[in-house]
């Protein structure tokens, strides 16, 4: 199959959407698994209807993945999702049970599918071999083709009742709406039955679309969202009434729907007729009344590419610069009457405030809930607890805390490592736990705690804790510590964060795979965060990640002058030229240098930032940065800033120095290098202007 | 609202990236696009304005594409709108059902932009 479209154009969209579906699939599979293993708590348990819905949702996700993958010519993904579909279809048709083995199969196929999709993102990855997995799926399907007796029998009663007779009129008022009534199949019938038993209210919402409504932003999608918020949707159908299309929504709700609560034309409360026979033979339905999860909350959402927000932040930055210049120029005005001066000051103050608000609201737009990363942890925990044969319960708090999109993404790796660490090193084996008088099941808690402009993410386990004396002994042996040194949690963390430092003898599976605490430290530091440890022997450990809520990423040139390094925003530099020191022409009050057929006024960065005063420029080649100066009188771009060395071009997380408006002239912010050293980000324009005015 | 020269197309698919691909394929016709990600949303759209053609996915939330098709073809107002079904569910049975229900064209995913474009072009000429 040949890619039909030039894949590149759709790559980002494909990857984003595929990832969404893969995540949804994993979530649904986890729900199925909890349910199938009987480990579900009451609020997690599913009744048969929900299970059917989950299977349907899974099928739809795989189906969409199949369609999308076909479009980008990813035939391995097409075959895998098709195979998964086949398994789900078998469940839907009742020829297979949702056994743990089957759910495992689906998990593994999904993981493989994710790897296949990854090859699109990263072409250096080799395409995994999918044949063995396809064969295993095939094998799983085979016994059923031949008719495996016990599984079919088990599933039989439920399927039987699914096929039960014609639709019983439980809601007599619906007789008027023949179209809706006709569309109620056995599944909907079951949903109604379950809702009756749970003592829920029934409602019929009627919605007539119109241009006026559309203009007001009221549409069928919005109504559906409102209904899902208020209760459970049983069936939605289109209907024709006097030549006009209208939509009928049959839904149940815990509470009666107050007038005006949802934007339908009419909401008719329905009275359910409780046929006793109907209820009697319906033993399969677990009757549970439960609150609807808050995660169903719907808000109006628009997707924006992160780049566009960055662009907006950049523009805001430019505006801030202009404001400063305006203030300067106002200050130079002479003979301005005092009242006017006052007004001007007020206006510039206002501009200041508005800019601050603007910046804050743009940063706010980049915020997403922590759950984007937290939601992936159940899968990690599941795999690791299996691999290590430990029983681990994961509890998550504060997943609705909002942090910067980039942070959420970059948090994933360190978090996975800490979770892995907690399960492999922290939580004891079941036997050890029982012996220590602990619950057999280990407890792992992830918590997001907002604290002003920072957030703390805690990874807490109730395992054995970090053994400080063991860490110390090892450190002494390695010559990192004196034998009489005192080791507290902080010191221990510093020690175990050293590359290659491990108190475990053998490399455990999982923790031995590359990412060590040293890498966690480096990542956390690179976005201006801090890692700390609290540990109690025998009771467990808490790793705390303290991180800034918002991140601004900037592409910078890292340059060196003497021993000092500085970062210069990439978009402030037109080009970088090599300069031969021998060609520098001294002249009165400065230096000139020829380059590219032109003469440039030479500025040495060391002098601009008034540092490295006694630094002698290196004798070899120098590098000149031609700054992008838009407001140069006459539009000339005749300046060049010389440095010893251009180290690299890289993306860094910008940390504003306290208040962004209380700026040191020429210093736009700071960034931390992976070794923890702080590097200042310089604004060449401002530096040059300062140099000119003396 | 819509100019004479620009045809109005409704692109119905629950996958945003597939919608984008379909729109890319049809762009040479210089059309005005509306998108819908579910069957009900699509019905709402056709209530609100006239479309010169609809591309329709089958497997969607709310109502299946086939249900959409049947409903639309039952209403006199919408009987003549050209409908192009574009789906991964491309077995013969489904093709048969879709064409019987009144779709003008059936295209299996994965599709090439050329096929979509030429089918839609041909349909527009007929109308």
Image (cartoon, rainbow, N blue to C red):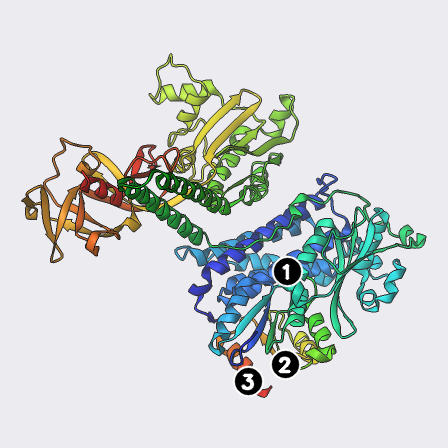
Q: Position of residue A184 (x, y in %)?
A: 81, 63
Q: Quadrant of residue A352?
A: top left
Q: Callout 2: residue from which chain?
A: B
- On whether disc 2 and disc 1 are found on a single subunit, the reply is no
Q: Which residue is mark 1?
A: A216
Name the residue located 67 percent from the left edge and 44 percent from the top edge. A294
Establish if A678 lies above or below A234.
Answer: above
Judged from the image, the secondary structure of the residue bearing numbered disc 1 is loop
- Residue A166 numbered mark, or none: none
Disc 1/disc 3 C-alpha distance (Å): 37 Å
- Residue B104 numbered mark, or none: 2
Name the residue located 86 percent from the left edge and 48 percent from the top edge. A197
Q: Image check: A388 left or right of A11?
A: right
Name the residue located 45 percent from the left edge and 45 percent from the top edge. A358
Disc 2/disc 1 C-alpha distance (Å): 34 Å
Q: Nearer the viewer, residue A119 or A369?
A: A369
- Residue B122 numbered mark, or none: 3
Disc 2/disc 3 C-alpha distance (Å): 11 Å
Q: Nearer the viewer, residue A508 or A276?
A: A276
Q: Image check: A497 left or right of A681?
A: right
Label 2: few (<14), some or many (≥20) within 10 Å?
some
Judged from the image, the secondary structure of the residue bearing numbered disc 3 is helix
């Amino acid at each position: 199959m040949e890619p039909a479209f030039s894949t590149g154009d759709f790559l980002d969209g494909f990857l984003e959407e595929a990832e969404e579906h893969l995540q949804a699939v994993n979530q649904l599979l986890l729900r199925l698994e909890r349910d199938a293993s009987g480990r579900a708590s009451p609020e997690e348990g599913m009744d048969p209807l929900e299970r059917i819905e989950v299977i349907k949702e899974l099928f739809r996700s795989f189906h969409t993945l199949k369609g999308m993958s076909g479009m980008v010519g990813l035939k391995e993904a097409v075959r895998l999702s098709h195979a998964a579909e086949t398994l789900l279809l078998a469940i839907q048709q009742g020829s297979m049970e949702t056994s743990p083995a089957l759910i495992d199969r689906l998990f593994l196929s999904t993981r493989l599918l994710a790897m296949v999709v990854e090859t699109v993102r990263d072409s250096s990855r080799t395409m995994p071999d999918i044949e063995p997995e396809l064969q295993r799926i095939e094998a799983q399907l085979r016994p059923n083709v031949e008719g495996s007796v016990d599984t079919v029998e088990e599933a039989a009663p439920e399927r039987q009742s699914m096929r039960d007779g014609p639709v019983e009129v439980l809601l007599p008022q619906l007789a008027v709406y023949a179209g809706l009534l006709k569309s109620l199949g056995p599944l909907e019938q079951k949903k109604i039955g379950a809702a009756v038993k749970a003592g829920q209210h029934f409602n019929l919402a009627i919605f007539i679309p119109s241009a006026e409504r559309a203009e007001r932003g009221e549409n069928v999608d919005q109504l559906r969202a409102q209904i899902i918020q208020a209760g459970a949707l049983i069936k939605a159908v289109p209907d024709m009434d006097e030549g006009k299309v209208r939509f009928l929504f049959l839904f149940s709700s815990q509470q009666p729907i107050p007038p005006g609560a949802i934007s339908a034309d009419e909401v008719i409360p329905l009275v359910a007729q409780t046929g006793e026979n109907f209820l009697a033979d319906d033993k399969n339905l677990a009757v549970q009344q439960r609150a609807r999860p808050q995660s169903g909350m719907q808000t109006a959402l628009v997707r924006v590419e992160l780049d566009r927000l960055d662009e907006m932040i950049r523009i805001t930055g430019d505006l801030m610069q202009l404001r400063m210049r305006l203030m300067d120029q106002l200050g130079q005005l002479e003979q301005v009457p005092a009242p006017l001066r006052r007004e001007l000051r007020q206006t510039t103050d206002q501009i200041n405030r508005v800019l601050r608000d603007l910046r804050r609201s743009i940063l706010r737009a980049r915020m997403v809930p922590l759950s984007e990363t937290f939601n992936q942890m159940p899968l990690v925990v599941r795999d690791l607890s299996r691999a290590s044969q430990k029983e681990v319960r994961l509890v998550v708090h504060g997943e609705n805390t909002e942090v910067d999109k980039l942070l959420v993404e970059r948090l994933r790796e360190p978090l996975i490592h800490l979770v892995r660490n907690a399960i492999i090193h922290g939580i004891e084996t079941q036997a050890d736990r029982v012996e220590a008088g602990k619950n057999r099941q280990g407890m792992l808690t992830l918590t997001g705690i907002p604290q002003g402009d920072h957030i703390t993410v805690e990874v807490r386990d109730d395992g054995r804790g970090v053994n400080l004396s063991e860490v110390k002994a090892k450190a002494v042996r390695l010559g990192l510590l004196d034998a009489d040194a005192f080791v507290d949690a902080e010191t221990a963390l510093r020690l175990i964060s050293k590359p290659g430092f491990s108190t475990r003898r053998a490399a455990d599976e999982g923790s031995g795979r590359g990412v060590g605490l040293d890498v966690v430290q480096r990542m956390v530091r690179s976005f201006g965060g801090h890692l700390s440890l609290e540990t109690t022997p025998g009771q467990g450990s808490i790793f705390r990640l303290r991180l800034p809520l918002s991140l601004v990423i900037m592409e910078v040139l890292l340059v060196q002058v003497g021993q000092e390094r500085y970062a210069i925003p990439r978009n402030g530099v037109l080009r970088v030229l090599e300069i031969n020191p021998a060609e520098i022409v001294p002249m009165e009050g400065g230096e000139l240098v020829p380059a590219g057929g032109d003469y440039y006024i030479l500025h040495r960065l060391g002098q601009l930032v008034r540092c490295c005063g006694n630094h002698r420029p290196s004798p070899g080649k120098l590098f000149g940065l031609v700054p992008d100066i838009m407001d140069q009188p006459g539009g000339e771009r005749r300046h060049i800033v010389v440095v010893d060395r251009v180290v690299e071009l890289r993306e860094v997380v910008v940390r504003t120095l306290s208040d962004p408006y209380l700026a040191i002239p020429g210093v736009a912010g700071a960034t931390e290098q992976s070794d923890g050293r702080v590097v200042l980000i310089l604004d060449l324009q401002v530096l040059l202007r300062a140099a000119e005015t003396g | 609202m819509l100019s004479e020269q620009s045809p109005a197309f409704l692109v119905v698919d629950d996958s945003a990236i597939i919608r984008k691909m379909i729109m890319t394929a049809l762009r040479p016709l210089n059309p005005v696009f509306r998108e819908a990600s579910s069957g009900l949303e699509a019905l709402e759209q056709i209530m609100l304005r006239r479309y010169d053609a609809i591309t329709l996915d089958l497997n969607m939330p709310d109502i299946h594409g086939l249900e959409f098709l049947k409903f639309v073809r039952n209403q006199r107002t919408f009987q003549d709108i050209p409908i192009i079904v574009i789906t991964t569910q491309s077995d013969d049975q489904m093709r048969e059902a879709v064409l019987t229900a009144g779709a003008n064209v059936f295209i299996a995913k994965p599709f090439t932009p050329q096929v979509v474009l030429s089918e839609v072009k041909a349909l527009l000429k007929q109308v």
